[in-house]
Image (tube, rainbow, N blue to C red):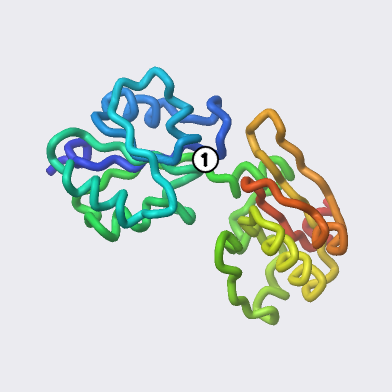
Amino acid sequence: MAITDKPITIVGCGPGGPAYLTDAARHAVEHAGLLVAANRLLELFPEAQAERLAVGADIAAVLQTMETRLGQLPMVVLVTGDPGMHSLARPVVRHFGRALCRIIPGISSVQAAFAAAGLDWMDARILSAHGTLPEVDHDDLEAVDKIAVLAGSQSALRWIADLAKRLAPRWILVCEELTLPGETVTKVTADILARMEASPRTVVLLLHPAVWDI
């Protein structure tokens, strides 16, 4: 089976701004028979003629519905950012197998955050505090100069604030609504971070002063 003939295409839609969609993503949507995504991603493509399956909290039900349609029409699963980073791509590929899935990469929120900071991220450590807070080895993180944490809740921000204090000194950049009209990038202290209310689309960068002050 050629890669372009695979019945499921998983498309990275970037951080949220329509300008950050790739031509490959738009082409895949244009040729979809069924679009599977959260409502806010479906809204990026009002002109699409495909059937729509909205994704909510019940991922198992979405996978079951997809299974009943498999082979009947080309399915395109839309995910925020890049499919390889904490997205719906993982359960879809785990359920259907890589042989049936084609993946189109997108711009991740982590890429957008480091771009906003004017820094490369080849040596960054990426953590996710979406839903479950991560278990980390603080001694291991002491040697990491760039840490990006996917946040989005007040509990996540409090956890990141505590991490920043343990790893001090660290500059803290709160990146919200990246690529969207409400985009903000704010430098804060750990105490301020612990009291902030987060946008659901938030990335926090913890940067060693030696990296930031260049």
- Which residue is pictured at 27% across the width and 33% down the height? 34
The three-letter amino acid code for the residue at tag 1 is Ile
- Which residue is pictured at 80% across the width and 62% down the height? 194
Residue under numbered circle 1: 107
Residue 11 relative to residue 106: left or right: left
The image quadrant of residue 154 is bottom right
Judge whether residue 126 can be spotted in this image: no
Where residue 2 appears, x then y in whole percent? Answer: 16, 40
- In the image, residue 30 sits, relative to residue 9, either above or below, namely above
As helix, strand or loop, the secondary structure at mark 1 comes to loop
- In the image, residue 80 sits, relative to residue 190, either above or below, namely above
Where residue 32 appears, x then y in whole percent? Answer: 27, 29
- In the image, residue 18 sits, relative to residue 47, either above or below, namely below
The image quadrant of residue 105 is top left
172, 129: nearer the viewer: 129
Where residue 73 appears, x then y in whole percent? Answer: 17, 33
- Which residue is pictured at 60% across the width and 69% down the height? 133
- In the image, residue 2 sits, relative to residue 157, either above or below, namely above
Crowding near the residue tagged with mark 1, few <14, some 14–19, many ≥20 C-alpha atoms within 10 Å: some
- Which residue is pictured at 66% across the width and 51% down the height? 203
Judge whether residue 18 can be spotted in this image: yes
The image quadrant of residue 48 is top left
Residue 84 relative to residue 52: left or right: right
Quadrant of the drawing holding the N terminus: top left
